Image (cartoon, coloured by chain):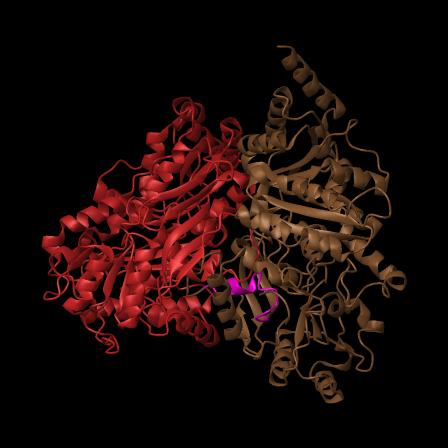
Chain colours: A brown, B red
């Protein structure tokens, strides 16, 4: 019985930590604004621009880091005539060209990713302002065998939006208008280049939310989100883009405008072709418009943060949350102790919990009735504390505290890059084995003597965090420098490990350039053949985002 | 102030009608079983079999009702050699042949739909027992140019699963095993031939539910549900199959087994090809297995039934329900007064409300906490009664009452067929104009003197009902006999009406044979061309479900 008493004490401790928590939160925000989380990516992107002088010479060209990749000589080389055509077709201001240089100057920001991992040689950036302009551009490129890289907010993690050689960057950033919103049905229609956060802020005024949320929100564009089938923080509650996107407008390489911008929740009229573009990573066409169903903004939002003694207990906490919080559970995030140590080391912020734990979970609930949600959450908290599933926890008392707690999860990716770089794997694994991958990877790097506390070791740390609710782990290796020895230790090791568990080598980040060679670990030869058939059907000249995907 | 008092009186009346309603419901069913609705379709199917003697001679062959359709002579005619091959490949018991007759005897049930509207000439039915057997069958058919109709539970409404000429019926009914279920993730893997209700009952024991529910549940098969992208009653809450289906196994005409039976919630590894089969209506391959994410079974279920004075008020009630019931709203169904008069006339059951109203709504809530849900519902009810949005209403006191209320919605399709037949349209229309289609159609049939109370008129009634939550209307014309004059009055009138409002001519029932000619009202020429490209890619010989879809 002694343990029970301890547990009950723990439950009291939690309530003491956050007195009158829920009431306070709702009094302060009677209209229940959605938590405005700090978007670390936005600042990461800014700081990478700032860091250009320091880094740009250090960032290797992708063509050098992947020496096996050769420029496909079927593709034409750019001439001044090409540039003139584009200038006439969509206006001088929408074309940035530097045919003599190789991705320098104004072009540099389009040629590099925010992680300083990929770098291309594009000499031309084109920004069509409409589907019609996009159609003229792509038709010309297709006829003249000019290779193209579609680019949205350029926040990707797998090099999908960065040219490898001299592909033309076709940016959707000028297509940034909200086309329509219907308050009764919640159906939003936007241009592809609308920034996710801008859409969400627009929806906030209409008392709705975008059914997708992710760290890169401040920079990423909805067209890119849909093209990469981004998952993010709200998937647990609102489901995937395959379900929420109702229609798309896209342009095929031959200039065909795929006008499938339905605003109907149900529409069974033939093959659902738009689905091929969701997650198609710009390899068969470029999305120019999106229609999506958006839920009502939940007036009540709660955020709690726990420390747990083991991964096994984190799994139990998740099962309890699913069962007890059910329809109001909107996020269940896992962070290991190392990831939180790193955030602490980089930000020097005060930790949410006094003691340190090997695992942490962040839970968010979103519902329509503050009192009911609080009651459900309280019952849940008392249960997991009294059962000693959770060792300690805090509950945000107001929006500021909620934001602060979210930073301990959302800040992980940026903080990991603090010492130089990060090897990132975004994988799906059946829940029971999810964290084992982190431990096995850590052991492997130790064995290979590639990881350690001093500068002689290229790797610093192996961490695991992610969307536990979707069995989606982010395995990250923080490094002092990118090093082929680490890459060799990690690949194909990580992919083989996942293949054995029938997991996915790409849960939500896509294939891009990073995983092109490894799709065989998640898809059969038959599936790859069928995918190549689709690619050939839509893009027979192969001009769309070459060297990547499959 | 007088009206306000009346309204408050009405609210009291409602509470009086169902005293201690919620408590009673939950006391009786402490473990909160999901309401087991009576499946009218199942009995309709049985009664249509029973009615065979009466009807079978009256049911016209589809080839006669659609004289423009000609048998495609590229397809081979069946021989005894073909039959022998199939008998050897999958066993005698799995093959039903009658090459001399034309769809008679044992074959008749496969050659007709339950509405007695479509009738084919198939001489052969094949029931493969596995994906491998399916592969052998389809490869042979493809090589020998034998046309094929995939058939599941044969509960469709558009003739999609009925042969037109002598196509071979390939039935999935022998593939009826539940392959696996994971209680932590809620991911279910089943054979295509598993009956929806069987899956739901299996899940009930595991405290989960199937994320799709529809009237034909007792007969329809999951493979057919996925092939037709069935919508149904739970879409409002759980979203569409495009979001919930995680993987499929399907067989292509050339025998290729598409092994895409992922059990991962997130998996971004290439084009999401399975989506083409969801709603593909068996025209590019046959689904043999499905992996789907299933939610926890909500322990608290409430059902309420209202009378309303106008469609405008029904819209207001829906808006209020969305806002106040939010995450627990699991169904919002609309039925017009005529539809309820018909159910009453056919079943002679006591009406749920004393007075008659031009419109009725059925609301279902499903949540994890009975007390919270009741409180939310009570607040909502008091609001809509006091605002005179709703004129009268009842709340189910127990499972039996809830079932009874659902019958007034689910019984509509069967009762409509009572006098002979039904012309059925399943459409999506923006909510404000949704019901106008019913009124305009009614007026049109009156003008044409095709509708009336006596036998000289072929049509009896025009009714509207459906899933208001999804802007999905079922426009039904109950007739004494099928009559070309009615068809001409209805088509293309209905389709043009919908096209003008940018609606969909097929919301959840699919295209099948019924709407093949009309897809142009909902899709552009470009979209149709792109769909035909997909069809050609997968089924170059055109053997899969010919004469239908696009």
Q: Which residues are magenta?
A: A272-285
Q: Residue at x 78, y 56 (%)?
A: A482
Q: Is residue A284 magenta?
A: yes
Vertical comparison of B443 with A379: above or below: below
Query: Which of the 4 quarters of the picture holds residue B481?
Result: bottom left
Quadrant for the C terminus of chain B in the image: bottom left
Q: Residue at x 77, y 29 (%)?
A: A356
**Residue A36 appears anywhere in the view:** no
Q: Residue at x 63, y 29 (%)?
A: A374
Picture coordinates of residue B67, whole percent (x, y): 21, 75
**Closest to the observer: A73 or B321?**
A73
Vertical comparison of A33 with B491: above or below: above
Secondary structure of the magenta portion, mostly? loop
**Residue A441 appears anywhere in the view:** yes
Picture coordinates of residue B348, whole percent (x, y): 22, 39
Q: Residue at x 75, y 38 (%)?
A: A338
Q: Is residue A441 left or right of residue A263?
A: right
Q: Is residue B238 left or right of residue A395?
A: left
Q: Is residue A264 magenta?
A: no
Picture coordinates of residue A521, whole percent (x, y): 56, 55
Name the residue at the bottom extreme: A81
Quadrant for the N terminus of chain B in the image: top right
Name the residue at the top extreme: A1
Vertical comparison of A261 with B197: above or below: below
Query: Which of the 4 quarters of the picture holds residue B209?
Result: top left
**Closest to the observer: B210 or B25?**
B210
For the image shown, how many numbered marks are present on the structure? 0
Picture coordinates of residue A308, whole percent (x, y): 68, 29
């Amino acid at each position: 019985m002694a343990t029970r008493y301890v547990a009950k004490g723990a439950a009291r401790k939690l309530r003491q930590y956050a007195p009158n928590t829920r009431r306070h939160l709702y009094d302060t925000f009677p209209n229940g604004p959605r938590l405005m989380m700090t978007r670390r990516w936005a600042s990461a992107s800014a700081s990478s621009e700032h860091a250009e002088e320091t880094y740009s010479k250090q960032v290797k060209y992708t063509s050098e880091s992947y020496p096996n990749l050769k420029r496909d000589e079927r593709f034409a080389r750019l001439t001044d005539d090409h540039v003139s055509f584009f200038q006439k077709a969509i206006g001088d201001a929408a074309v940035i060209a530097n045919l003599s240089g190789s991705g320098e100057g104004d072009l540099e920001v389009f040629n590099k990713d925010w992680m300083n991992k990929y770098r291309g040689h594009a000499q031309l950036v084109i920004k069509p302002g409409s589907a019609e302009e996009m159609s003229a551009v792509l038709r010309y490129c297709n006829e003249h065998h000019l290779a193209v890289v579609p680019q949205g907010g350029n926040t990707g993690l797998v090099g999908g939006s960065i040219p490898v050689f001299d592909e033309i960057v076709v940016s959707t950033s000028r297509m940034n208008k909200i086309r329509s919103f219907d308050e009764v049905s919640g159906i939003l229609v936007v241009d592809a280049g609308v920034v996710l956060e801008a859409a969400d802020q627009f929806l906030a005024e209409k008392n709705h939310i975008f059914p997708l949320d992710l760290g890169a929100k401040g920079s990423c564009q909805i067209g890119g989100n849909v093209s990469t089938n981004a998952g993010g923080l709200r998937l647990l509650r609102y489901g995937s883009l395959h379900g929420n996107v109702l229609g798309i407008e896209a342009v095929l390489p031959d200039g065909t405008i795929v006008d499938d911008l339905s605003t109907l929740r149900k529409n069974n009229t033939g093959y659902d072709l738009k689905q091929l573009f969701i997650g198609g990573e710009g390899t068969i066409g470029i999305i120019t418009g999106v229609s999506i169903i958006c839920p009502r903004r939940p007036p009540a939002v709660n955020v709690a943060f726990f420390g747990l003694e083991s991964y096994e207990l984190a799994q139990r906490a998740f099962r309890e949350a699913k069962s007890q919080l059910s329809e109001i559970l909107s996020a269940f995030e896992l962070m290991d102790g190392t990831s939180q140590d790193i955030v602490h080391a980089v930000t020097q912020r005060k930790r949410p919990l006094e003691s340190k734990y090997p695992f942490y979970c962040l839970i968010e609930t979103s519902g329509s009735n503050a009192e009911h949600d609080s009651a459900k959450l309280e019952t849940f908290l008392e249960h997991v504390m009294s059962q000693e599933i959770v060792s300690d926890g805090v509950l945000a008392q107001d929006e500021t505290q909620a934001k602060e707690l979210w930073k301990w999860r959302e800040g992980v990716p940026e903080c990991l890059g603090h010492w130089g770089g990060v090897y990132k794997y975004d994988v799906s694994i059946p829940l029971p084995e999810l964290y084992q991958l982190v431990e096995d990877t850590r052991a492997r790097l130790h064995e290979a003597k590639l990881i350690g506390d001093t500068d002689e070791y290229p790797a610093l740390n192996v961490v695991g965090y992610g969307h536990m609710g979707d069995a989606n782990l982010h395995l990250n290796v923080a490094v002092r420098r990118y090093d082929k020895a680490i890459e060799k230790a990690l690949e194909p090791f990580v992919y083989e490990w996942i293949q054995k568990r029938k997991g996915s080598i790409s849960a939500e980040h896509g294939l891009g350039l990073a995983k092109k060679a490894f799709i065989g670990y998640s898809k059969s030869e038959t599936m790859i053949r069928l995918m190549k058939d689709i690619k050939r059907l839509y893009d027979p000249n192969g001009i769309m985002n070459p060297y990547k995907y499959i």
